[in-house]
Image (cartoon, rainbow, N blue to C red):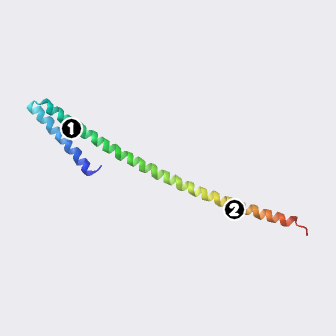
Amino acid sequence: MNTDSNLEHDTQELKGHVEETAGKVFGDDDLVARGKADQIAAHAKQAATKTGEAARHVGQQLKERAMRKLGELHERLHEASDEAKRAKQDSNVRERSNAQERRPK
């Protein structure tokens, strides 16, 4: 969590506690309600920030996994290509050998 955001959320929550307490002390129901609203808003912002961070973390993990899988696929494609080239060369060698055997002597 960003330090500035964390400080803002904590400040808003503390302000809400102060307002709520002052409202109770002075019998001001509106001040109590505003205090509770500030606290709820601060908690909601904290939750949203944590959710965003979690989503970024999951996204990063998915990206890393996809990159690993693409790397593995890339290697397998190179291996398959190399194997196809070897098979083609072997086939060409066999064809030349067969052609030489069929030539009249």
Q: Amino acid at mark 1?
A: Asp
Q: Which residue is mark 1?
A: 38
For this orientation, the residue located farthest to the bottom is 105
User: In percent of the image, x 62 and y 58: which residue is there?
Assistant: 79
Q: Residue at x 49, y 51 (%)?
A: 66
Image coordinates for residue 78, horizontal then vertical, percent: 60, 59
Which residue does the image show at 37% across and 45% down from the upper left? 54
Q: Name the residue beneath numbered marker 2.
A: 86
User: What's the CA distance linking mark 1 and mark 2?
Assistant: 72 Å
User: How dense is the environment of label 1, judged by Cα within 10 Å: few (below 14), some, or many (20 and up)?
Assistant: many
Q: Nearer the viewer, mark 1 or mark 2?
A: 1
Is residue 68 found left or right of 39 in the rendered image?
A: right
In the figure, is residue 15 to the left or right of 56?
left
Q: Amino acid at mark 2?
A: Arg
Residue drawn at point x = 14 percent, y = 37 percent:
19
Residue 27 at what x, y percent from top left?
A: 10, 30
Please give left or right for residue 85 compared with residue 104 in the image.
left
Q: Earlier in the sequence, mark 1 or mark 2?
A: 1
User: Where is the C terminus found, in terms of image quarters?
Assistant: bottom right
Q: Quadrant location of residue 49? A: top left
Residue 34 in the image: x percent, y percent?
Answer: 18, 34
Q: How many marks?
A: 2
Does 97 appear above or below 9? Answer: below
- Give the answer, above or below, for where 14 lies relative to 95: above
> In the structure shown, which secondary structural element does the residue marked by tag 1 occupy?
helix
